Each structure stands twice: as structure tokens, then as C-alpha cells.
């Protein structure tokens, strides 16, 4: 391959590093109205009265909008293909407030200080209601988060607003109870993961205006432009044909911008005033009213025979969706479907789940999309099982891991056609020098070093659902224009898709100009999520290139006055296979633009019946102070099977960044609420994300399989890389201290408390 698996520089690299105006705020006119939101100070309340007269009297204040000014038709903010599994439980503004930070009013004016003053003059009276903050008691609780009659669920996911359920259900294969009863070893434990914040560099922001024809135009930092168009249509009650969404460069999303968190607020201002409006969330707003990972409480049972065969896995996931149900029904499924299938010898599995409403910030999508929670629980349980059996956890996995060719009942019944998980494990074991370091080494200074391991899988798009289209044309002089609907949010998909096209067209990546997303001109793409772009949009790119090459050959055959089967295309010219007579692509393009010739243009779409999983093995080496519980991450090894690597630089950076985020989830990032529902961790001062100094050494390698249904053997990489650090680090702590930390993040206080409790049990004769 000439263009794939090469470290080609990203197409937007120089524009970004030289500070060109490419982001939403850069492209907004200086005279745009400033929009801000007045937010609820209460976790649960009803608005009884709003007096905005003093605010409206200020010169320069264009509007103050409240629940009385918005449509009463509910919708979801989840960026998902219609009909969305997420319930329709939102209004733009609601009289019923459901978390601290829920919007009360939209204020727009000519400058930020004026709008701040106006918000301080708005008088709101509330009927404060008792909040429901504990997900453990939310199901069937008498306090209802959504008692309204116009709540609805479009897809049968077990949702019931009268039971505080956004989703509920179960799936099983085999007789779990009977198989577990026949196991020699069973581990049964409960694990807890927190509602991590994506903390992307560019916060949520949108600029809206009306074009000369009165259509609403939305310039937004989003992962899902076409979904945003539909969501705005539902929220505002206007046809989709009256809405245009443009995606500029995006300063990070990680799933947060798979929800249309705030586009409807400036859009409503523009519709009411006819003026351009800009809303930029502060860092605090992104923390208190964003779209974080779902908090999960997971109960796991894993059973094995004495010869090491894992025969059954039973998982119950309780997911806290917060005040609204975005992505709740779908993230919870991945906690099982991206963890249980890793173990290919299991005779039975069962997965049960409830997704409950509470009076905290609404959750949403975050890299991994439910898989990190499930993998922390299942992989930690397997590590605890290995310890109980006195087995090396690597050996236990080598014996039980899923293999290429197997049917995976817990993964939608799909056959595994590409898998290098065994090679990933062998490579990671070699890189970490596992046999030398396992289980632990006492350093003689009160500190101990140990290693831990975890496996992970993800998907590559959503089967029979995710659709992407690509358009490609030959311009005069023979260069190409590639139009895509996939949203590059820093992931480099503009570059990687250009590489796929260049490989197909036998040209340089520099010969391809990539056009970003504009819903008026781009072909449809559901957006950048579900690890689908390289696999789904990549295959759409291959199909489009094949169609275009056929048209180039047809035009060349006509110019050379011969049959189609007599000519070929080498990327530069169409030539006759026997006589070597030829016409260059440049001449052909110019020729076809005159004399009413057919345009050299093609567009194709792709939807897959498969979602081939990428795999990863992660190994962590940690150092723990036995007197204080302080933990330092010394080394992290990640070995990834993402099929064929498209861009070696981008793939490595994706892996390193995902591992760093997983380390943050494992050791640092905490979400804490007061008994009144106030979020304590509402800034980067209180919400600790790891710096480069906190993550130790990160080493990444690739062991590629070949996926026959992907473009040139490609699978996804974007999400699988975040999944292994929490269970791998927990496994290292277990091997070092004998203590299991089942509640994230694994802070020194928790490690010290667990070691102390374990020491007390050991000293108690009754325990012995």
C-alpha cells in the first residue's frame, strides 16, 4: 500500500498550530448577540413566577425568554439515528427544573457584561421539591423526575417515566444459575464508576443567524451536524428544510458533542430577534450542565472450573442517566456487549439492566460509550477470580479469550472474522516483561511495585443502522474534491479518509481537497461516533472511488475511441492496455468540462451488516507506598488490534490519548454532589484530570488483523483505547496489596483504607 499505514501529516495541522481562525468563536461576527443562560440553583423545583421586567428595561437587552416562550413538544438531545432510543423528555425551557444548572431563562444582549447584569435583575420564585439523588433507590420511587403526560419513548427499550426508568431489560444465553452452580470457583462483587466529564479544550459553543432567505443557519462545534438539524427541527417546531448546520473545526468532543447540548438556545434567540447570536459555555457550565459519562453500579458474578475455564458471566448494570435520558438506553447495553464476549468459552451469560432518572446533571456519550464501565467490572472480577484460583491473570485470559472464527452470542451473535487478541496479549506480556514483574516486588523502602492486566473490545459502527455517504469529483487540472459528512473533531478523519481515497485513486493525498460538513452541500453521514468513521465512512469512500474510476475509464475509452475493457487507469492517465495510447487525467477533466460531456463525479453510501470489534490488551506497572496508599503509575503498555492502520501517527496519538483518559478515570476524576444536589467538582481546580506528569510512560504497539468487511482490512480505534486502564491498574493494586478497589477513582485514601481493612482481617484470629 502506498498511502495507508503511513505517518502523513493531518490536513489541518498547520492551520491549527499557527492559530488560524477555524473554530466557531473565531468565525462569529463581532456584532453577534451574546447569549447566556440563567440556571436553577435547586436540584428539583417548579417555577412559580418569573419577573424579567428590570432586565428587559436595560438598553441593549434584546430578549429574555422563559418556559412560556417555547414550544411544548418534547424531544431528545441525543445525536442518534431516528427514531432515537433515547426518550423524548426535554423542552427548550421547562417550568419543572430537574437538576442544579437546569436552564431557567435565555438572555441575549449586545455584550457579555450587560447580559450578566440583566441576569442578576431577573426575579424567580420557586417551589422547591425534594430531590432524588440516589440511583440505588430511584426505580419505582414516589418522587417522579418526569411526571408529565407528554413524555414519550419512540423505541421499546423498557422505558417508563412513571417508574423513573429511561430503559430496562435483560438478555441471556444458556442457564446461568445452573452453570454457576457447577463451577468450582465463583466471584461475586459490586463495582462503581463515576460520571466522568470529557473536559475537552473547546467548550460547547454555537453561533446562529438567518441567511438572506430567512433560513436558520447554525455554526456549531458538534460531532453530529445532520442530527443537530433534526433535533433543532423537533425543538423549534420548524421544517428541517429551514435549517442549515455547518461544522467548523472542533476543539475536542470525546462524545460530549454527540448531544445537541445547547444549539437550541441561540437558535431560539435568532428566531425571536432575527439577529445573529452566539452562546459559549464557560468551563463551569460545561462541568455542571454538560453531557458526562453515565455513573454505573455493576454487580458481577463470574464462575470457572478448577482447570481454569470461565463458564458463566452474570452482569447487572444500574445506570444513572440523571435528569434526562440522552444515550441512557444504548450506553448501558455496551457495558455487557463489549465485555462478556471477550471470554469465548463461556457456556452461559446473563445481562440485566435498569437506567434510572435522578436529580443530577443529565449524562450522555463519552468515549467508550458504556464499555469502560462494564470492562472495569468484568475485567476486575476476572482478576479477582485469578487471585482466588491462584492463577496468573494473563494465563487465565490466554486460556479463555475469544478467538478468530468464533460465534459470539453476547455480541449480537456475530462471527469474529478478524482477531489478533492473542498476539496483543503476547506482545504486551513481552513489552512489560510480565513474567519478571508479576505479581509484585518489594522495593525495601516501604514501597512495592506490581503489574496488572486487562483486555478490551469495542465495535466499528452500529450494524444495519450507521450510514455514511461520500461525494468525489475530478476538477480541472485533475485534482479531486472529496466531500464528506463525517465530523472531524480532532480525530484526523479528513486526513485518513483522504488517504483511503488516495490509495484507491493511486494518487497523492495532496491531490485531494477535503470539504468539511455543511448539511446543505455534504452527503449524509450520521456523524462521528460509535467508532464508525474509519470503517463505515471509509468503506463509503472506497465504493465512491470505485464508481469514479469506472467513470474515468469510460470517459477515457470514449476519448481513445476504444472499448471500456481495453483501458485502465493508473492515477495519472487512462491508457490502452495494448497500444499504450493514453489521455491524462488533467486533459480528460478539462475535456469533460466542455462539450456537454458527463461530469466526472460519483457519490456512494455504505451501511454494514457487521460491526467488527477491535481489541486491546493493557498492562500497568504501579508503585504503591504501603504507609500512605499513594500510587504512582510507572509504565503503561497498550497493544491494539484495529485491523489495518490507516495513519500510523494518528493511530498512535489516538491510543496514547485514550489511555491517558482511562488513567484519569482510574485514578483522578471524581464527581461528588452535596445532599442538595450541588456539584462540587465544577471546575478544573476541583475536577482533576491527569497531566503529562501523572500518566507515567505510555507505550503503544499494534498487532493488526485483517477485517474482510472493512476498507483495506480496517477496523476502528477511537474508543477501544480508553477501556483497559481502570481494570489493569486495579489489578496491579490487587497484586501489590491483596486489596480490591471496586470504586473509582482509586485514590490513595481508598487504597490505604483497603490495605488497613485487609490488615485488620489478617490480624483477627476469627478471620483466620
Image (spheres, rainbow, N blue to C red):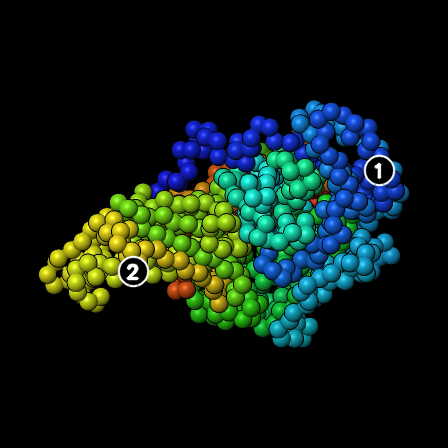
Q: Nearer the viewer, residue 643 or 639?
A: 643
Q: CA distance from mark 1 to mark 2?
A: 64 Å
Residue underneath mark 1: 50
- Where is mark 2, residue-wise? 551
Helix, strand or loop at mark 1? strand
x 42%, y 38%: residue = 12
Q: Quadrant of the C terminus?
A: bottom right
Q: Is 399 on the left or on the right of 587, as rendered?
A: right
**Residue found at x 66% / y 42%:** 271
Along the line of sight, which residue is nearer the eye, 489 or 152? 152
Q: Residues within 10 Å of mark 1 (few under 14, many from 20)?
A: some
Percent across and percent down for residue 273 are 68, 37
Residue toward you, 19 or 43: 19
Residue drawn at 33 percent across, 60 percent down: 546
Total labels: the figure holds 2
**Residue 69, horizontal then vertical, whole percent:** 76, 44
**Measuring 64% from the left and 38% from the top, which residue is drawn there?**
274
Q: Is residue 640 above or below residue 750?
A: below
Element under disc 2: helix
| Residue 83 screen position, x and y as percent | 63, 62
Amino acid at each position: 500500500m502506498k498511502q495507508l499505514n503511513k505517518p502523513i501529516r493531518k490536513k489541518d495541522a498547520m492551520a491549527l498550530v499557527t492559530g488560524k481562525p477555524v473554530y466557531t468563536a473565531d468565525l462569529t461576527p463581532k456584532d453577534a448577540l451574546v447569549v447566556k443562560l440563567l440556571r436553577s440553583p435547586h436540584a428539583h423545583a417548579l417555577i412559580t413566577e418569573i419577573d424579567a421586567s428590570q432586565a428587559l428595561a436595560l438598553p441593549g437587552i434584546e430578549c429574555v425568554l422563559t418556559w412560556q416562550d417555547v414550544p411544548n413538544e418534547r424531544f431528545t438531545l441525543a445525536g442518534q439515528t431516528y427514531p432515537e432510543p433515547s426518550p423524548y423528555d426535554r423542552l427548550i425551557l421547562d417550568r419543572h427544573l430537574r437538576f442544579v444548572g437546569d436552564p431557567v431563562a435565555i438572555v441575549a444582549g449586545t455584550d457579555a457584561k450587560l447580559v450578566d447584569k440583566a441576569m442578576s435583575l431577573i426575579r424567580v420564585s420557586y417551589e422547591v421539591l425534594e430531590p432524588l439523588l440516589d440511583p440505588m433507590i430511584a426505580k419505582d420511587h414516589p418522587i417522579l423526575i418526569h411526571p408529565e403526560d407528554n413524555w414519550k419513548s419512540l423505541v421499546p427499550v423498557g422505558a417508563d417515566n412513571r417508574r423513573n426508568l429511561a430503559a430496562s431489560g435483560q438478555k441471556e444465553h444458556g442457564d446461568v444459575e445452573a452453570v454457576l452452580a457447577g463451577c468450582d470457583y465463583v466471584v461475586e462483587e459490586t463495582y462503581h464508576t463515576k460520571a466522568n466529564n470529557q473536559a475537552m479544550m473547546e467548550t460547547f459553543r454555537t453561533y446562529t443567524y438567518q441567511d438572506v432567505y430567512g433560513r436558520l443557519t447554525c455554526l456549531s462545534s458538534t460531532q453530529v451536524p445532520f442530527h443537530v438539524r433534526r433535533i433543532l427541527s423537533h425543538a423549534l417546531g420548524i421544517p428541517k428544510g429551514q435549517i442549515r448546520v455547518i461544522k467548523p473545526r472542533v476543539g475536542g468532543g470525546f462524545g460530549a458533542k454527540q448531544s445537541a447540548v445547547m444549539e437550541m438556545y441561540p437558535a431560539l434567540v435568532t428566531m425571536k430577534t432575527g439577529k445573529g447570536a452566539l452562546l459559549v459555555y464557560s468551563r463551569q457550565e460545561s462541568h455542571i450542565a454538560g453531557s458526562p459519562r453515565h455513573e454505573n453500579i455493576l454487580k458481577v458474578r463470574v464462575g470457572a472450573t478448577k482447570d481454569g475455564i470461565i463458564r458463566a458471566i452474570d452482569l447487572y448494570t444500574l445506570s444513572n442517566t440523571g435528569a434526562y435520558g440522552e444515550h441512557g438506553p444504548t450506553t448501558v447495553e455496551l457495558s455487557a456487549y463489549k465485555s462478556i464476549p471477550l471470554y469465548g468459552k463461556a457456556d452461559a451469560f446473563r445481562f440485566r439492566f435498569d437506567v434510572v432518572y435522578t436529580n443530577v446533571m443529565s449524562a450522555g456519550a463519552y468515549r467508550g460509550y458504556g464499555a469502560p464501565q462494564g470492562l472495569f467490572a468484568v475485567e476486575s472480577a476476572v482478576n479477582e477470580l485469578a487471585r482466588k484460583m491462584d492463577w496468573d491473570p494473563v494465563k487465565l485470559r490466554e486460556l479463555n479469550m475469544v478467538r478468530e472464527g468464533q460465534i459470539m452470542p453476547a455480541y449480537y451473535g456475530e462471527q469474529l472474522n478478524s482477531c489478533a487478541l492473542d498476539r496483543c496479549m503476547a506482545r504486551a506480556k513481552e513489552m512489560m516483561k510480565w513474567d519478571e514483574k508479576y505479581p509484585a516486588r518489594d522495593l525495601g523502602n516501604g514501597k512495592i511495585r506490581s503489574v496488572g492486566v486487562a483486555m478490551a473490545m469495542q465495535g466499528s459502527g452500529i450494524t444495519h443502522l450507521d450510514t455514511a455517504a461520500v461525494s468525489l469529483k475530478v476538477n480541472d487540472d485533475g485534482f479531486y474534491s472529496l466531500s464528506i459528512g463525517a465530523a472531524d473533531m480532532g480525530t484526523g478523519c479528513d486526513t485518513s479518509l483522504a488517504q483511503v481515497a488516495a490509495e484507491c485513486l493511486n494518487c497523492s493525498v495532496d491531490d485531494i481537497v477535503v470539504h468539511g460538513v455543511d448539511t446543505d452541500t455534504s452527503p449524509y453521514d450520521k456523524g462521528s461516533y460509535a467508532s464508525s468513521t474509519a470503517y463505515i465512512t471509509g468503506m463509503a469512500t472506497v465504493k465512491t472511488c470505485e464508481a469514479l474510476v469506472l467513470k474515468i475509464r469510460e470517459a477515457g475509452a470514449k476519448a481513445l475511441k476504444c472499448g471500456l475493457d481495453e483501458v485502465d487507469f493508473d492515477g495519472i492517465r487512462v491508457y490502452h492496455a495494448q497500444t499504450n495510447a493514453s489521455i491524462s487525467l488533467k486533459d480528460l477533466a478539462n475535456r469533460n468540462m466542455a462539450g456537454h460531456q458527463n461530469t466526472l463525479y460519483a457519490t456512494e453510501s455504505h451501511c454494514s451488516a457487521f460491526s467488527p470489534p477491535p481489541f486491546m490488551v493493557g498492562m500497568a506497572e504501579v508503585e504503591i507506598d504501603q504507609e500512605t496508599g499513594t500510587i504512582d503509575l510507572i509504565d503503561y503498555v497498550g497493544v491494539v488490534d484495529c485491523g489495518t492502520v490507516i495513519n500510523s501517527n494518528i493511530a498512535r496519538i489516538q491510543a496514547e490519548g485514550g489511555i491517558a483518559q482511562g488513567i484519569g478515570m482510574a485514578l483522578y476524576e471524581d464527581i461528588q454532589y452535596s445532599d442538595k444536589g450541588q456539584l462540587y467538582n465544577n471546575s478544573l481546580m476541583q475536577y482533576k484530570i491527569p497531566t503529562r506528569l501523572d500518566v507515567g510512560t505510555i507505550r503503544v504497539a499494534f498487532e493488526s488483523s485483517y477485517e474482510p468487511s472493512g476498507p483495506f482490512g480496517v477496523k476502528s480505534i477511537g474508543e477501544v483505547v480508553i477501556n483497559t486502564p481502570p481494570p489493569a491498574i486495579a489489578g496491579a493494586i490487587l497484586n501489590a496489596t491483596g486489596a480490591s478497589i471496586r470504586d473509582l477513582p482509586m485514590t490513595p485514601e481508598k487504597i490505604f483504607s483497603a490495605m488497613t481493612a485487609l490488615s485488620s482481617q489478617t490480624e483477627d484470629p476469627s478471620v483466620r
